Amino acid sequence: MYRSASPLTRDQIARVAPSVLATEPHDSRGERYAYIPTIAVLDRLSAEGFLPYAVGQTVTRVPGKRNFTKHLVRLRHASSNLVKVGDSIPEIVLTNSHDGTSSYQLASGFFRLVCSNGLVTGNITEEVRVRHTGHVADDVIEGCTRILDDIKIAQGRIGEYQSITLAPEEQRLFAQSATSLRWDEGTTPIRPDQLLIPRRWNDESNDLWTTFNRVQENLIKGGLRGRATTGRRLSTRAVDSVNENTRLNKALWALADGLAKLKTNG
């Protein structure tokens, strides 16, 4: 992933995610495949006020597929209604591919300035998916407009998380559940409470939102000291895969949302 403090240029996008600028689909696609380059959709979105701030794509070892693989673009809109929540900026997360492995998919997300983590809100509503058929660009623009409504809901949800205080045992249970999202049982190289360690002083609060952010940053960024099942010392790796990063983010949001419901109903 590459991120900029200002909207990305085509040259910046091309260096990190050449598949965004693909001029044709992979040769495995048939005649019914409606090919609309992602860059053409981004141009249309730009005209509607949606600008790209981050981009990435999956790595492939298949010869000839690098320019067609799944890619992710995070966009922001200049709407005055989409204000920051604390240090988190609302974004739209767009994924696509030109090799048939993905339709256009849209989801709501937030980018936290202080730790450079991109959160995907996984269960506000269902993702918007646009197949490679028909009027793809128009459908994606319509989908982005729908996602803006999801972001407004998510902003309110974050405010709710900030008002929920977690006891130490509840924080540990949240961290324990989070480890199972990334590692299979019996293979976890770290202690769950390592996910709760703050990386900066203003992340020491015990509310659900701050706890979520500590766990998410430690889980996604890696760098935690641990041991493999063989006893070998190791440091956990950052989650760089587009697919895995998105999956973990959605699962963590769902985990936090479930805990919030238990706390407010109980």
Image: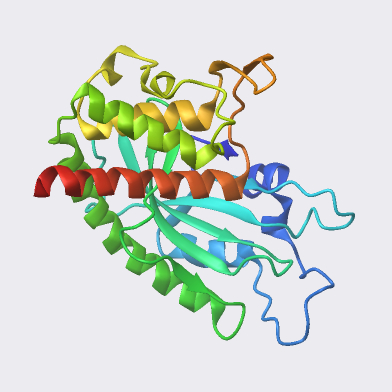
Above or below for 239 versus 78: above
| 243 with respect to 163 (left or right) | right
Total numbered labels: 0
Where is residue 140 drawn, in percent x and y? 48, 71
Side of 130 where 151 appears, left or right? left
In the displayed structure, does residue 214 sit left or right of residue 262? right
Question: Can residue 143 be spotted in the picture?
Answer: yes
Taking 5 as reference, is 76 above or below it?
Answer: below
* Residue at image point 54% right, 36% down: 185
Specify the quadrant of the image occupied by residue 148.
bottom left
Residue at coordinates 20% horizontally, 40% vertically from top-left? Answer: 161
Which residue is more in the foreground, 1 or 184? 184
Residue closer to the observer: 39 or 234: 234
Q: Quadrant of residue 111?
A: top left
Residue at (67% x, 81% y) in the render: 34
The C terminus lies in which quarter of the figure? top left
Q: Where is residue 237? Give x, y as percent.
A: 62, 27
Q: Is residue 6 visible?
A: no
Quadrant location, the N terminus: top right
Above or below, 175 against 263 in this view is above
Which of 173/235 is in front? 173
Q: Specify whether 58 is left or right of 214.
A: right
The image shows residue 72 at horizontal and vertical percentages of 57, 52
User: What scheme was used to colour the molecule?
Assistant: rainbow
Where is residue 95 drawn, in percent x and y?
Answer: 56, 58
Q: Residue 145 is drawn in which quadrant? A: bottom left
